[in-house]
Structures are given as structure tokens and as C-alpha cells.
Amino acid sequence: MLQDCPKARREVELHWRASQCPHIVRIVDVYENLYAGRKCLLIVMECLDGGELFSRIQDRGDQAFTERGRNDLLREQAQAGSAVEV
């Protein structure tokens, strides 16, 4: 839930456009509502179960990623980053 303002609307719009990338969580729908007398945006996103990148890194402990694994992660991040560019 975001308080409705031009900055929040722009953020939702950019995320909506970028969510076509398979490496970015997809926005399913956005609703306008009132909460405690304030206009809000309710954002419904797809449910993901892949976990957080930080958790994946921590779980490896002292074991380094393989070169192939690092390349795959960096490629996914670059694709997501290019989808976000305006």
C-alpha cells in the first residue's frame, strides 16, 4: 500500500512497464482506496517463491558461486535493470 501522490503513481507506472521482464515481479492490478482518511494505492503483485538473492548468497556460506552461476545472476540483474530504464 502506498500513499497516493504523483511520485507513487510514477513508481507504479514504471514498475508496471518493467514487469514485462521475467526477472521483475509482475503487477497484477492497482486499486485506489481510502485508508485512515488518506488516498492510497493498493498494489497486487504476483506471488513468487524463489527467495531473495541476499538469502541465496548467505546460504552458500564460504562456498563461492561458480563462474557460470555468477554469470547467470549478473545476466538476470542486467536484464531487469535494462527493463527499468526510462
Image (cartoon, rainbow, N blue to C red):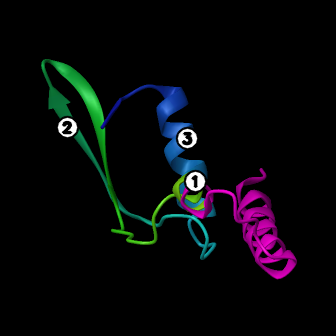
- As rendered, which of 86 and 70 lies closer to the eye? 70
Considering only vertical position in the picture, is 17 above or below 6?
below
| Residue linked to disc 1 | 58
Residue 43: x and y in percent read 33, 50
Which corner quadrant of the image does residue 4 belong to? top left
Residue at 81% across, 64% down: 78
- As rendered, which of 32 and 62 lies closer to the eye? 62
Q: Residues within 10 Å of mark 2 (few under 14, many from 20)?
A: some
Residue at 36% across, 68% down: 46
Q: State the separation of the CA atoms marked 2 and 3.
A: 17 Å
Nearer the viewer's eye, disc 2 or disc 1?
A: 1
Which corner quadrant of the image does residue 45 belong to? bottom left
Considering only vertical position in the picture, is 72 above or below 28?
below
Q: Tell me: 69 left or right of 23.
A: right
- Let me know if residue 61 is in the magenta part: yes
Q: Residues within 10 Å of mark 3 (few under 14, many from 20)?
A: few
The amino acid type found where label 1 is placed reads Gln
Residue at far front of view: 62
Nearer the viewer's eye, disc 1 or disc 3?
A: 1
Q: Secondary structure at mark 2?
A: strand
Residue at 80% across, 76% down: 66
Q: State the separation of the CA atoms marked 1 and 3.
A: 30 Å
The amino acid type found where label 2 is placed reads Asn
| Residue linked to disc 3 | 11
Magenta segment: 57-86
**Circle on res. 33:** 2
- As rendered, which of 11 and 52 lies closer to the eye? 52
Q: State the separation of the CA atoms marked 2 and 1.
A: 39 Å
The amino acid type found where label 3 is placed reads Glu
